[in-house]
Amino acid sequence: MHPAEHLDRDGLAAWHGARLSRLLADMYGRNAFYTAKLDRAGVRLDALRLPADLDRLPPTTKAELVADQEANPPWGTALTEPLVNYTRYCQTSSTTGRPLRWIDTNQSWQWMLECWKAVYRAAYVAPGDRVFFPFSFGPFLGFWAGFEAAGQMGLHVVPGGGMSSQMRLAMIDAVGATIICCTPTYALRLAEVAAQDRARPRLTDSAVRVLIVAGEPGGSIPATRARIEQSWGARVIDHHGLTEVGPLSFECWEAPGFLHVNEGEFICEVLDPLTGLEASYGQAGELVVTNLGRTASPVLRYRTGDVVVKCADPCPCGRTWLRLEGGILGRADDMVNVRGVNVYPASIEAVVRRFSDIVEFRSTVSRAGAMRTLRLEIEVAPPAADWKALASEVAAQLRQALGLTVPVEAVEAGVLPRFEMKASRFIVEG
């Protein structure tokens, strides 16, 4: 258990103040990016009262970090230690532009692993569990930290990189995996492949009891979550983090549909995008994050672009940390205005996943003159009785949910792409 897990808000404020003061003292004069940034903002560390004066620290954007790396290739200047001390390399998946290169020292990487251990504890994962990781093991952070944290906790870790989905399913059966760590999309893809093989045992009869999903908002979308849990006969635990921030939030067993922010290791603000002030409970805002223990490669008041809603109600699990209702609702940079309606990819998925016959989908936003239009393609599992009727029902529910008329087309099986890591189902053309 983290020492700050059950502190009241005053206790957490004191914890945050002490940790942030230490972080700033360790960074200033050593981290060129943040030393210059604080100086430009006129911030004097000895005059700060923390965390009350948190808003005096200038926010950080991904665009700034990308520009810094372009001006000072390849690593940029947001590093606190000499380069020789860095031992780990990751990069962002570049879904919103040029990828960021991110490096860690042994100490800062260990901090990442400790954050992942909080995810496992919330999911009641413990020694005796066998954790399977069906991801590519490439340069993206993905589940790398979860993989190494599991071994440190005494879990039996099984790598599943470089395999087909059929091979991965066979290994899950052969080793008796009890925990799967993957994206929501890939959990559904494995279920689709398993259903096509009538000779293999049903997933619901496997030893898998928990799927820890991350990389997409699907784990907190009720229809997607229900589809995964029904397919596997197992519990879904959602998790969220960013390469440049670290493993940030997790769902506890007791309260599905909410993400706890790890306030023991992060200070999180939810800011109104119009005023820049702290959003009220129940009001959507942008998640802004300061990590407190990744001193070698930190971020101060990092604008994540994630749209979230703070929940004021206490959690049945007893943790006092901030909760985000509905998890990550979307990304500010993913939102597209279609004929006067703000549309997020997660809003479309929340509707489509209600239909069990739909195995995959793709939405495309096009521009016709000054106006954008949205259309949806759905791939239907055979033998669906009436594809046209299903497409009409999906269109009706999209109209009800979004207030938009969306043309829906059913396509042949196997036409739409499949994904192992982050899916790309929301295409914006111009």
Image (cartoon, helix red, strand yellow):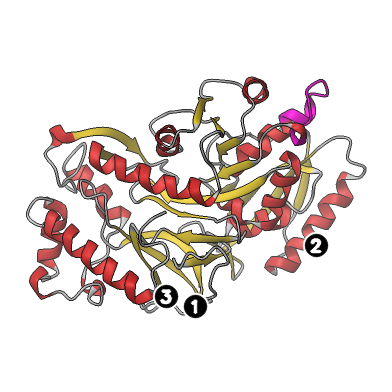
Q: To which quarter of the image does residue 76 belong?
A: top left
The numbered dot on residue 272 is 3
Along the horizontal axis of the image, is 137 left or right of 298? right
Amino acid type assigned to the residue bearing label 2 in the image: Ala
Identify the residue at image location x=25%, y=72%.
51
The numbered dot on residue 396 is 2
**Circle 3 SS class:** loop
Distance CA(mark 2)–CA(mark 1): 32 Å
Identify the residue at image location x=21%, y=50%.
295
- Magenta span of residues: 193-204
- Of residue 16 and residue 220, the one placed in the foreground of this image is 16
The image position of residue 205, as x and y in percent, is 77, 33
Identify the residue at image location x=61%, y=67%.
339
- Of residue 196 and residue 66, the one placed in the foreground of this image is 196
Identify the residue at image location x=9%, y=50%.
30
**Mark 3 Cα within 10 Å, few/some/many (few <14, many 20+)?**
some
The numbered dot on residue 281 is 1
Q: Can you see residue 101?
A: no
Q: Earlier in the sequence, mark 2 or mark 1?
A: 1
On screen, residue 62 above or below 128 = below
Q: To which quarter of the image does residue 93 belong?
A: top left
State which mark lies toward you, 1 or 3. 1
**Mark 1 Cα within 10 Å, few/some/many (few <14, many 20+)?**
some
